[in-house]
Image (cartoon, grey):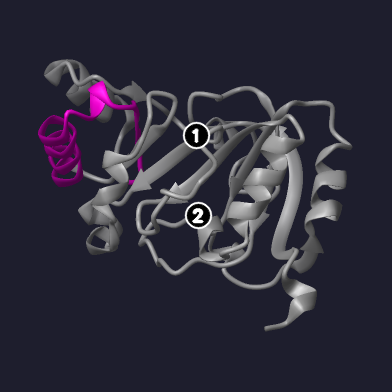
């Protein structure tokens, strides 16, 4: 084991922006984007973070975050939990008094995530081409402050998500988010489906893309 790496993570970028998704949408937030992801979702919009980045110590990460006058921090990727020491970073952020959210796909267990962290679990619908990687056990350990996000490409994805919500009574367990794949599904169409079925979800459009497009670091 490389002991020099025990308190380090490979960080693609740390930046200050408005939260574009989740129940913290619109709040000024510091984003810590970790390098790497084991999934290859068809509609991924952060492929640039699969490789590259720099090794940073936990102390240096915390110091960088503290430069911005906001209590909100989001750990994202790629897939942040693919780096095992990400769990320790979450602990350190909580210890430093930040309100922490974690954006993670549904393929890695969140059981060891610090309970103070707001987990946003992006369950992969069939249209992502990674649906078989979902760890459905994650759905049983979420709390009322946690969120499950569904990114919907078409009606097949929508019906899949609707069935998962109803079968697992997810609306009784956690908060639910649903958004369209940009450029593939009309936001109005998805909104109409949700209203027609009286689905207990929060509809979302990615705020950061409306403001700044696909520019990294926004």
Assign the N terminus to one quadrant of the image. bottom right
Assign the C terminus to one quadrant of the image. top right
To which residue does mark 1 refer? 206
Crowding around mark 1 (Cα neighbors within 10 Å: few <14, some 14 to 19, many 20+) is: some
Q: Is residue 2 above or below residue 85?
A: below
Q: Is residue 158 magenta?
A: yes
Residue 127 location in percent, x, y?
24, 55
Horizontal arrangement in the rendering, residue 54 relative to residue 142 (left or right): right
Q: Which residues are magenta?
A: 155-184
**Which mark identifies residue 19?**
none
**Residue 104 seen in render:** yes
To which residue does mark 2 refer? 45
Residue pictured at 61% horizontal, 56% vertical: 86
Residue 198 location in percent, x, y?
17, 16
Residue pictured at 56% horizontal, 57% vertical: 80
Residue pictured at 71% horizontal, 31% vertical: 98
Residue 43 location in percent, x, y?
39, 56
Q: Is residue 27 above or below residue 167?
A: above
Q: CA distance from mark 2 to mark 1?
A: 11 Å
Q: Is residue 143 above or below residue 130?
A: above
Residue 151: image quadrant is top left
Crowding around mark 2 (Cα neighbors within 10 Å: few <14, some 14 to 19, many 20+) is: few
Q: Is residue 101 magenta?
A: no
Residue 149: image quadrant is top left
């Amino acid at each position: 084991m490389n002991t020099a790496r025990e308190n380090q993570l490979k960080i693609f970028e740390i930046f200050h922006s408005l939260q574009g998704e989740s129940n913290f949408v619109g709040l000024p937030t510091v984003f810590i984007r970790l390098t790497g992801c084991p999934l290859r979702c068809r509609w991924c919009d952060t492929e640039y973070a699969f490789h590259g980045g720099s090794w940073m110590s936990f102390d240096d990460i915390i110091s960088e975050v503290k430069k911005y006058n906001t209590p909100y921090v989001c750990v994202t990727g790629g897939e942040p939990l693919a780096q095992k020491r990400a769990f320790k970073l979450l602990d350190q952020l909580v210890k430093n008094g930040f309100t922490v959210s974690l954006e993670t796909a549904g393929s890695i267990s969140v059981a060891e995530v610090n309970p103070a962290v707001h987990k946003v679990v992006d369950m992969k619908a069939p249209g992502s081409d990674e649906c078989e990687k979902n760890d459905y056990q994650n759905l049983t350990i979420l709390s009322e402050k946690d969120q499950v996000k569904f990114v919907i490409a078409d009606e097949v994805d929508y019906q899949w998500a609707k069935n998962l919500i109803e079968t697992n009574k997810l609306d009784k367990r956690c908060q639910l988010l649903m958004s369209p794949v940009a450029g593939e599904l009309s936001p109005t169409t998805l909104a109409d489906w949700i209203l027609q079925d009286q689905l207990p979800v929060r509809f979302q459009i990615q705020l950061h893309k409306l403001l700044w497009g696909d520019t990294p670091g926004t």
